[in-house]
Image (cartoon, rainbow, N blue to C red):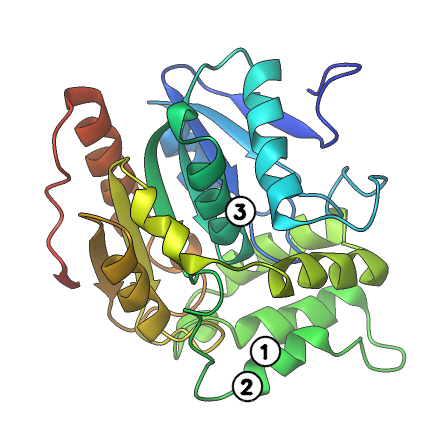
Amino acid sequence: MSRSRGPEVHWRACGRGPGLVLLNGWSASGLAWPRSWLRELEREFRVVRIDNRGSGWSRFVPTPFTMADLADDVAAVLDAAELPSATVLGMSMGGMIAQEFAMRHGDRLDALVLVATRAPAPAYIVPRTSGEALGLLTPPRRGEALDTYFTRVWSTAVGDGFADRNADAIAELVRQIVERPTPRQMLVHQLRAVNGWGHAERLRGVIAPTAIVHGTQDRLMDVRNARRLAELIPQARLVELTGVGHLPPLEAPDAVLEVIADVAGAAANGSTPTLETSSS
């Protein structure tokens, strides 16, 4: 739990071991991670989940805010959690926050895992198709229940056939989102922070062991963005997950666990990640 006079944002921690910070994407709070996947992580790490500004229990924060503010929130949470450093995993917008944290607070970063995300401007590659992204900006239909709305929206974010084959996984995600949905006004503030983020050349200064994970069927964030990140961050390793969409921890949890273990182990041993830069 967050401490009084501490970070601007709410956070929660569970598990024992080296620190692992999880940063979720646009509109999603720290609640919205697969529970069975979290349990596996908590066996090896002290897992810290942050509600990014505007989401979850971090609704009542000063606005507007920037990507730098979001990254500084991570450092403040590490202070409150009494963690001198941590591995940081960020997904989508959370991956942008993680990159900014790496650039602003590199001395507190053990390893970096960037999932389904992109670099700052001007290195961002626009998706070939935008229909799915526009769906996330469209409000519920008249009379549509929130759970029905989020099921419809997030079923389009995963790889082909995943939602039909794994209805329980989608249902769990929807329950987590509905528990504390992000207000539309805060969605706009988050988007403004993303749109104002730039200076991609700074990524060349990131020296922590880094893994980049991206699904080949990600229609919200073109996989070419992952390849661009791998070019910008020195010695970063790229793992492309065949048939996976925008939510790898949900769609390919074991693969993401393997990546985390590899980069965290490399950080602990002072070595280079052993992941191959290839499709899986």
For label 3, the residue is 97
Question: In the image, is residue 53 above or below residue 168?
Answer: above
Q: Is residue 209 above or below residue 184?
A: above
Residue at image position (58%, 53%) is 172
- Residue projecting furthest to the top: 82
Q: Residues within 10 Å of mark 1 (few under 14, many from 20)?
A: some
Side (left or right) of 197 relative to 43: right
Where is residue 145 shown, x and y percent of the image? 81, 69
Task: Give how far across and how far down residue 118 sits, in percent.
Answer: 43, 63
Q: Which residue is mark 2?
A: 130
Residue at disc 2, secondary structure = loop
Rendered residue at 54%/73% (across/down): 155
Q: Report the amino acid beneath label 2.
A: Ser
Where's residue 254, x and y in %?
28, 47
* Location of residue 95 with respect to 258 vertically, above or below: below
SS of the residue under disc 3: helix
